[in-house]
Image: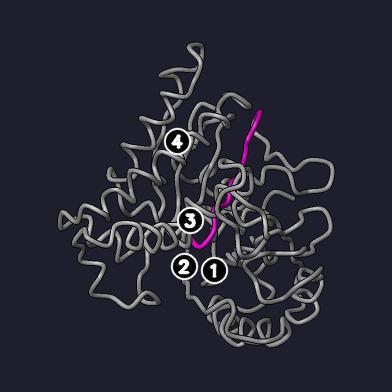
């Protein structure tokens, strides 16, 4: 009896993976660094060495229905990771087939944010919803759009890349894509770090706890810690980030009229410091028919769990 699946969430910084049963319980999970290896073959070997003992502890390979993977620019139709901006491996990587060969198991792959959306729909804040959007705020900005209970994939498998939509034409350059002014360049953890460096430079006379750090050591966590202590520049970074994110969410709402937008990922640990300016900007930029209709909420799942659960659900769905 195939009781389990492996769920793998490939993020820009960390890869999280776990053994999941049919009821959505994660029996065991672990993580590894995504970009610690020069080649994708070395990365897959690292995954194998960490996951194979988990499989053995759960009763062996015959107990597993397969491996589900959520990855940046993961194409559900082809099983390829294609031109992922946040990964070392460039070009088109036949990831699902490489994993299937190494593990001797069925492997299905989708976009990492789509996997998180599936996790929310089956086990999290979006249970019972047929129209919602998940936005993952981590190293990048991912998104999963669900309409009529189905993930929006488009004709080529890449629909719903809301993080790469342009919110400031001619704005900050995204180092991975070379595009100016995308949401990911501002609202991701990486974007918040860039905003911090800019604001510290623009306001040299304003005292800030962040000035005690070397520029390379400033992270979104540093910004949050400073903001909690009343640091004016750090608080302004959250106001600015929330303003841009809220404007973008207003556009997304007027496109698909979701019941809810579920925010997920490391940046959301800031709580109301991010949520309040985001909601304010979102509502301020909606036409009347959409105002006060869309719930803006945080994921109910643990940070790692939604994407692991959603990736594993790829195996159970077919």
Q: Which residue is mark 3?
A: 188
Q: Could you tell me if the residues under marks 1 and 2 are in contact, i.e. CB atoms within 8 Å? A: yes
Mark 4 element type: helix
Marks 1/3 in contact by CB < 8 Å: the verdict is: no
In front here: 238 or 105? 238
Relative placement, left or right, of 269 versus 104 is left
Q: Position of residue 234 (x, y in %)?
A: 27, 55
- What residue lies at 59% left-to-right and 52% top-to-bottom? 113
Q: Is residue 244 magenta?
A: no
Please tell me whether residue 273 is drawn above or below residue 315 in the rendered image. Answer: above
* In this rendering, position of residue 145 left or right of residue 94: left
Question: Which of pointers 1 and 3 lies earlier in the amino acid sequence?
Answer: 1
In the rendered structure, which disc, 4 or 2, sits on the residue that comes first in sequence?
2
Q: Which residue is mark 1?
A: 19
Q: How many neighbours does mark 4 have within 10 angstroms: few (below 14), some (14-19), or many (20 or more)?
A: many
- Is 139 in the magenta? yes
Q: Earlier in the sequence, mark 4 or mark 1?
A: 1
Residue at 62%, 52% (x, y): give it: 180
Place of residue 249 in the rendered image (x, y in percent of width and height, measured from the top left): 51, 34
Q: Alpha carbon of mark 1 to alpha carbon of mark 3: how far?
A: 28 Å
Q: Which mark is residue 27?
A: 2
| Residue 246, disc | 4
For the point 33% across and 78% down, which residue is it? 214
Magenta residue span: 138-148
């Amino acid at each position: 009896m195939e009781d389990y699946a492996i769920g793998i969430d490939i993020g820009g910084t960390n890869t999280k993976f776990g053994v999941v049963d049919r009821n959505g319980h994660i029996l065991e999970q672990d993580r590894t660094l995504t970009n610690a290896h020069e080649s994708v073959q070395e990365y897959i070997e690292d995954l194998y060495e960490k996951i194979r003992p988990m499989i053995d502890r759960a009763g062996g390979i015959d107990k597993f229905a397969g491996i589900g993977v959520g990855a940046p620019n993961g194409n559900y139709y082809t099983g390829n990771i294609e031109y992922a901006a946040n990964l070392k491996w460039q070009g088109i990587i036949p990831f699902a087939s490489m994993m299937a060969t190494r593990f001797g198991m069925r492997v299905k792959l989708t976009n990492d944010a789509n996997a998180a959306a599936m996790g929310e729909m089956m086990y999290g804040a979006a249970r019972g919803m047929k129209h919602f959007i998940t936005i993952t705020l981590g190293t990048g900005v991912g998104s999963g759009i669900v309409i009529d209970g189905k993930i929006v994939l488009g004709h080529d498998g890449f629909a719903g890349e809301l993080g790469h939509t342009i919110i400031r034409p001619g704005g900050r350059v995204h180092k991975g894509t070379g595009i100016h002014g995308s949401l990911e360049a501002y609202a991701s953890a990486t974007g918040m770090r860039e905003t911090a460096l800019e604001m510290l430079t623009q306001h040299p006379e304003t005292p800030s706890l962040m000035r005690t750090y070397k520029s390379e050591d400033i992270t979104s966590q540093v910004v949050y810690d400073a903001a909690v202590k009343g640091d004016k520049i750090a608080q302004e970074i959250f106001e600015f980030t929330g303003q841009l994110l809220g404007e973008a969410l207003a556009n997304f709402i007027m496109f698909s009229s979701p019941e809810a937008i579920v925010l997920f990922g490391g940046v959301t640990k800031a709580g109301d410091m991010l949520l309040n300016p985001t909601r304010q900007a979102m509502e301020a930029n909606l036409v009347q028919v959409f105002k006060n209709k869309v719930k803006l909420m945080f994921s109910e799942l643990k940070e790692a769990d939604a994407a692991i659960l959603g990736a594993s659900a790829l195996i159970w769905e077919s």
